[in-house]
């Protein structure tokens, strides 16, 4: 089981470590002091955008609000995911050559014929 992190207590600890008051955080973030108090006391769970504001105000990286340690956590060795460029049809190889040929040919035909081809392609794709 992973250890529980009290995000409010972590924020309070960083704030006190830096010699800042809740009023200082209020000025830097625009969040109300009473809201900051509710977060620090565990009465409110802040949204990630709010945590980003607080991390900036405290001048700490966001991950440190969730992580108990000095260095960033080591990332697991996950399999490499395909990028959007790898997934897009026509981005490489034979598909790219075919798409380029279509582009050249489409440039040589008139607008009414282009619209007709687009209509036909849409119909074929919906089958």
Image (cartoon, rainbow, N blue to C red):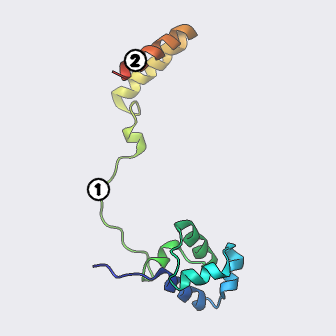
Relative to 90, say whether 13 is above or below.
below
For the C terminus, give its image quadrant: top left
**Residue 78 appears in which quarter of the rendering?**
bottom left
**Crowding at mark 1 (Cα within 10 Å: few <14, some 14-19, many 20+):** few
Q: Secondary structure at mark 1?
A: loop
- Pinpoint residue 77: horizontal percent, then vertical percent: 30, 64
Residue pictured at 52% horizontal, 72% vertical: 62
In the visual, does 30 lie left or right of 14? Answer: right
Relative to 86, say whether 64 is above or below.
below
Relative to 16, say whether 57 is above or below.
above
Distance between the alpha carbons at the discs numbered 1 and 2: 38 Å
Residue pictured at 55% horizontal, 72% vertical: 51
**Crowding at mark 2 (Cα within 10 Å: few <14, some 14-19, many 20+):** few
- Pinpoint residue 73: horizontal percent, then vertical percent: 39, 74
Name the foreground residue: 17 vs 34: 34
Circle 1 residue: 79
For the N terminus, give its image quadrant: bottom left
């Amino acid at each position: 089981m992973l250890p529980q992190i009290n995000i409010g207590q972590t924020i309070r600890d960083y704030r006190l470590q830096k010699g800042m008051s809740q009023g200082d955080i209020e000025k830097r973030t625009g969040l109300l002091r009473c809201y900051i108090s509710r977060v620090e006391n565990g009465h409110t769970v802040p949204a990630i955008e709010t945590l980003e504001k607080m991390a900036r105000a405290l001048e700490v990286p966001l991950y440190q609000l969730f992580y108990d340690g000095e260095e960033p956590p080591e990332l697991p060795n996950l399999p490499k995911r395909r990028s959007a460029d790898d997934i897009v049809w026509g981005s490489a190889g034979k598909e790219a050559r075919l798409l380029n040929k279509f582009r050249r040919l489409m440039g040589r035909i008139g607008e009414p014929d282009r619209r007709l081809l687009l209509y036909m392609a849409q119909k074929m794709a919906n089958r």
